[in-house]
Image (cartoon, helix red, strand yellow):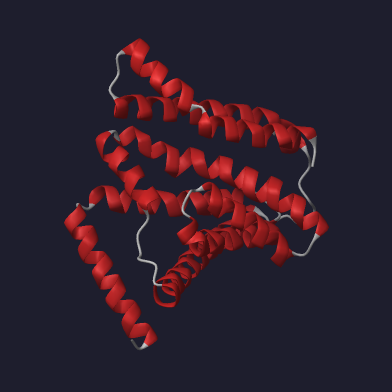
């Protein structure tokens, strides 16, 4: 792994933990409320992090594309196929978690993001646009790519997806995150273009955030119950 890749990873880690120092500072200096400071610093830190990461990745952007990299038309096909694959993988993983391990559906991480987004809609730019770019560069291009050079696809995807799940702070949903990671890694290998998993990741997050933003909590709860009933029918429960 090149030195600049380690700098990219370090930038991401510093960005994730920067709030420990800067959020209290913003509240003290600018007299902000807690939530206002969290939203403001999260947006600022993600934008700074993205700019730094893209700057560090400039040499990669200037490299010529692989000869067998997908054409724009094929990329569109893989993006649409990848969206379907991601939803299918996520659904299967959710069923395994629920009926094999007794883990209740729903994500505290997503709920927290949506609570913030409802209070400050501008926050949606983070999960919908900025986070997918950084996460695919780090977890697919850098981490998966490093493992893939030394092992086969399955092991590389498994290890990178495990790290991807752990970093989201919901180990109980590691199967769901791992399933996403496998799909994104597969799309990256098939197309030889990191932009494909980035776009699929963006679409998944954007659809999820938009749907949850437009629906009130009661509607979401009703939809979750209908989803659980559908799962019961599918598995013959």
Residue 162 found in image quarter: bottom right
Q: Residue furthest right?
A: 150
Looking at the rendered image, the quarter that the N terminus falls into is: top right
Up the image or down, 206 lies above or below 221; here it is: above
Q: Is residue 112 left or right of residue 61?
A: left
Residue occupying image coordinates x 41% and y 16%: 25
Residue occupying image coordinates x 26% and y 40%: 118
Q: Residue furthest left?
A: 218
As rendered, which of 119 and 26 lies closer to the eye? 26
Q: Is residue 230 left or right of residue 10?
A: left
As rendered, which of 156 and 133 lies closer to the eye? 156
Looking at the rendered image, the quarter that the C terminus falls into is: bottom left
Q: Is residue 170 left or right of residue 217?
A: right
Residue 49 found in image quarter: top right
- Tell me how many marks there are: 0
Residue occupying image coordinates x 51% and y 27%: 18
Q: Position of residue 188 (x, y in %)?
A: 66, 56
Q: Position of residue 195 (x, y in %)?
A: 61, 48
As rendered, which of 30 and 131 lies closer to the eye? 30
Q: Position of residue 139 (x, y in %)?
A: 63, 48
Up the image or down, 231 lies above or below 7; here it is: below
Up the image or down, 30 lies above or below 21; here it is: above
Up the image or down, 19 lies above or below 32; here it is: below
Q: Residue furthest top?
A: 29
Residue occupying image coordinates x 38% and y 17%: 26
């Amino acid at each position: 792994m090149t030195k600049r890749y380690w700098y990219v990873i370090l930038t991401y880690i510093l960005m994730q933990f920067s709030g420990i120092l800067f959020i209290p500072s913003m509240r003290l200096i600018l007299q902000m409320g807690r939530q206002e400071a969290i939203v403001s610093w999260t947006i600022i830190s993600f934008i700074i992090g993205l700019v730094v990461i893209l700057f560090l990745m400039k040499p990669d952007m200037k490299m010529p594309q692989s000869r067998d990299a997908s054409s724009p038309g094929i990329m569109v096909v893989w993006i649409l196929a990848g969206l379907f694959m991601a939803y299918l993988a996520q659904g299967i993983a959710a069923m395994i978690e629920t009926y094999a391990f007794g883990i209740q559906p729903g994500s505290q991480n997503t709920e927290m993001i949506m609570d913030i987004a409802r209070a400050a809609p501008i926050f949606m730019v983070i999960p919908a646009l900025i986070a997918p770019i950084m996460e695919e560069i780090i977890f697919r291009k850098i981490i998966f790519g490093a493992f893939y050079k030394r092992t086969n696809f399955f092991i590389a995807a498994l290890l990178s997806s495990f790290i991807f799940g752990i970093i989201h702070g919901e180990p109980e949903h590691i199967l769901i995150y791992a399933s996403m990671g496998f799909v994104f890694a597969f799309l990256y290998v098939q197309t030889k273009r990191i932009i494909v998993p980035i776009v699929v990741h963006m679409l998944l997050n954007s659809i999820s955030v938009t749907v949850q933003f437009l629906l009130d909590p009661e509607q979401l709860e009703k939809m979750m119950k209908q989803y659980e009933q559908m799962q019961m029918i599918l598995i013959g429960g």
